[in-house]
Image: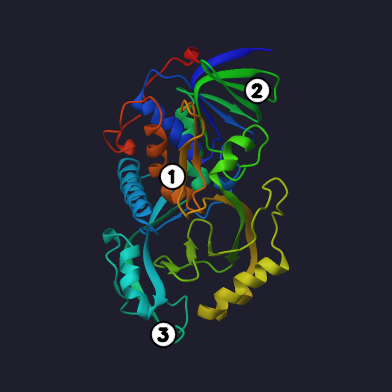
C-alpha cells in the first residue's frame, strides 16, 4: 500500500469542496491540497442544484452568510463575466400581515418594495397575500461553474475522482485516510464536505453528534420556455420558488418535500406520484395554468442542520478534521460564506479580501 502526505485533504468535490480547496490555496499558496471524490467532480447534489441565490436569511448568522456570499458572487461575476451566473429580478409572495417579518428576513440589499404588478407567470393571489419586488437575485448553472473551478484548480491541487474514502483515522501527526483504491493518504488537516453522504462508514461516527439529517429534494420542470424578462418568484411561507431557466429553456418549480432520512445512494432519481402531487398542490394555489406543463422534474436529497443553519465545526479535539455543509438546501447560495468559516478553522492566514477578487497562485504539484 502506498501512503502519500498532503497538507490538506478535502473530501467531496462539489461546489463547496472546490471552493474550500480554492480558498486554502488562496490563503496559503504553498500548501499542498488533495480533493477526493467518490464519483466525478460535481456529480452529487451540485449536479442537481437549482442554483438560485436570493438575499435572505432565517437568522442573524445566515443573513451575514447570505450577504458575504452575495458580495462574493457579485465580485466573481464582475471579474469573470463569462461564467454561468445570471442576475434575475425577483418577486416575493407572502401574507400581507407578515410584511414586517419579511423585511427582517431579507437583507437591505434586497430593497424590497411593493410590487406594482404581478408577474404574468402567476395568477391572482389568494386573499390575504401580497407581492414585493426585490433586487440581488441570481442563479447559476452550478454544475458548469464547479467544472470551471475544478479546471482552474487542477494545476495547483491533486484531484482523485472515483476514489472512495473508506477510513478516516486521526493520528498524532495528522489524519490517516484509507482509500478504496488500496492506497492511503495522510493529511495534516481534513475538511469533510460530503453533501448528503453523512452516513458514509468512514466518517459516520464523527458526524453523528452534529445532528444533521438528509431530506429528499423534489423540483418540477415546467416545459414552457421563459420569456427573456421573466423573474424568479419566491413563495415565502411555502419555502418554494419558480425559477426561469433561460439557458435550459424551461421553468423549475421547487417546493419543500418533507421526506426525511433518505439515503443518497438509494433515493429514486425519478418523480413519484406522491412527490409530484405534493408539488402540484402548492403550485396550483398560485399558477394553476402551469400544472398541465409539469411533465418532468428532478429528485435527489440534501443535508440539513438541526437549527436550519449550515454546520461548520471541528469534529476532533485537535481541530484536524472539520465538517462543512448541511446547508439546508442552500449549498450554492451560502457556499462562499461556508468556505470562509471552514478556512477560519484551519491553520491558515485570515481572509483579507473577497476570494473572487484574487487568482489562484502557481504551485508545484509534487509537494503533495
Does residue 337 sit above or below 219 in this rendering?
above
Please name the residue that numbered disc 1 is placed on: 335
- Secondary structure category for the residue under label 3: loop
- Name the side, left or right, on which 215 lies relative to 234: right
Residue 178 numbered mark, or none: 2
Please report the residue visible at 34 percent of the width from the left and 27 percent of the height from the top: 27
Q: Position of residue 140 (x, y in %)?
A: 45, 51
Q: Where is residue 47 in the image (x, y as percent from the top left)?
A: 57, 47
Q: Which of marks 2 and 1 is nearer the N terminus?
A: 2
**SS category of the residue bearing label 1:** helix
Labelled pair 2, 3 in contact (Cβ < 8 Å): no
Q: Name the residue under label 3.
A: 128
Horizontal arrangement in the rendering, residue 257 relative to residue 1 (left or right): left
| Cα–Cα span, label 2 and label 3 | 57 Å
Label 3: how many Cα within 10 Å (few below 14, some 14–19, many 20+):
few
Q: Is residue 109 left or right of residue 221?
A: left
Relative to the observer, which residue lies in front, 350 or 40?
A: 350
Q: Which of marks 3 and 1 is nearer the N terminus?
A: 3
Amino acid at each position: 500500500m502506498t501512503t502519500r502526505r498532503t497538507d490538506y485533504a478535502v473530501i467531496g468535490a462539489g461546489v463547496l469542496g472546490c471552493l474550500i480547496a480554492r480558498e486554502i490555496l488562496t490563503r496559503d499558496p504553498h500548501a499542498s491540497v488533495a480533493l477526493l471524490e467518490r464519483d466525478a467532480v460535481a456529480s452529487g447534489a451540485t449536479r442537481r442544484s437549482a442554483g438560485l441565490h436570493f438575499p435572505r436569511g432565517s437568522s442573524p448568522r445566515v443573513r451575514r452568510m447570505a450577504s458575504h456570499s452575495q458580495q462574493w458572487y457579485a465580485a466573481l461575476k464582475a471579474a469573470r463575466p463569462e461564467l454561468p451566473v445570471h442576475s434575475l429580478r425577483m418577486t416575493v409572495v407572502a401574507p400581507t400581515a407578515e410584511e414586517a417579518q419579511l423585511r427582517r428576513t431579507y437583507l437591505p440589499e434586497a430593497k424590497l418594495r411593493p410590487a406594482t404588478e404581478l408577474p404574468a407567470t402567476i395568477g391572482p393571489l389568494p386573499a390575504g397575500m401580497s407581492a414585493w419586488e426585490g433586487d440581488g437575485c441570481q442563479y447559476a448553472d452550478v454544475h458548469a461553474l464547479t467544472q470551471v473551478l475544478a479546471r482552474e484548480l487542477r494545476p495547483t491541487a491533486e484531484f482523485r475522482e472515483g476514489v472512495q474514502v473508506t477510513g478516516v483515522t486521526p493520528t498524532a501527526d495528522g489524519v490517516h485516510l484509507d482509500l478504496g483504491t488500496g492506497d492511503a493518504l495522510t493529511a495534516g488537516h481534513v475538511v469533510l464536505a460530503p453533501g448528503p453522504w453523512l452516513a458514509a462508514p468512514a466518517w459516520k461516527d464523527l458526524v453523528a453528534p452534529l445532528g444533521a439529517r438528509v431530506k429528499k429534494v423534489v423540483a418540477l420542470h415546467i416545459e414552457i420556455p421563459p420569456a427573456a424578462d421573466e423573474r424568479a418568484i419566491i413563495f415565502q411561507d411555502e419555502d418554494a420558488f419558480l425559477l426561469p431557466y433561460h439557458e435550459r429553456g424551461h421553468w423549475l418549480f421547487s417546493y419543500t418535500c418533507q421526506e426525511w432520512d433518505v439515503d443518497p445512494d438509494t433515493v429514486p432519481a425519478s418523480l413519484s406520484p406522491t412527490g409530484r402531487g405534493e408539488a402540484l398542490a402548492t403550485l396550483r394555489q398560485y399558477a394553476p395554468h402551469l400544472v398541465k406543463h409539469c411533465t418532468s422534474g428532478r429528485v435527489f436529497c440534501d443535508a440539513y442542520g438541526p437549527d436550519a443553519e449550515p454546520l461548520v465545526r471541528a469534529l476532533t479535539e485537535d481541530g484536524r478534521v472539520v465538517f462543512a455543509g448541511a446547508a439546508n438546501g442552500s449549498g450554492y447560495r451560502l457556499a462562499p460564506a461556508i468556505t470562509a468559516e471552514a478556512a477560519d478553522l484551519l491553520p491558515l492566514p485570515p481572509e483579507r479580501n473577497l476570494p473572487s477578487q484574487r487568482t489562484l497562485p502557481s504551485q508545484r504539484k509534487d509537494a503533495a
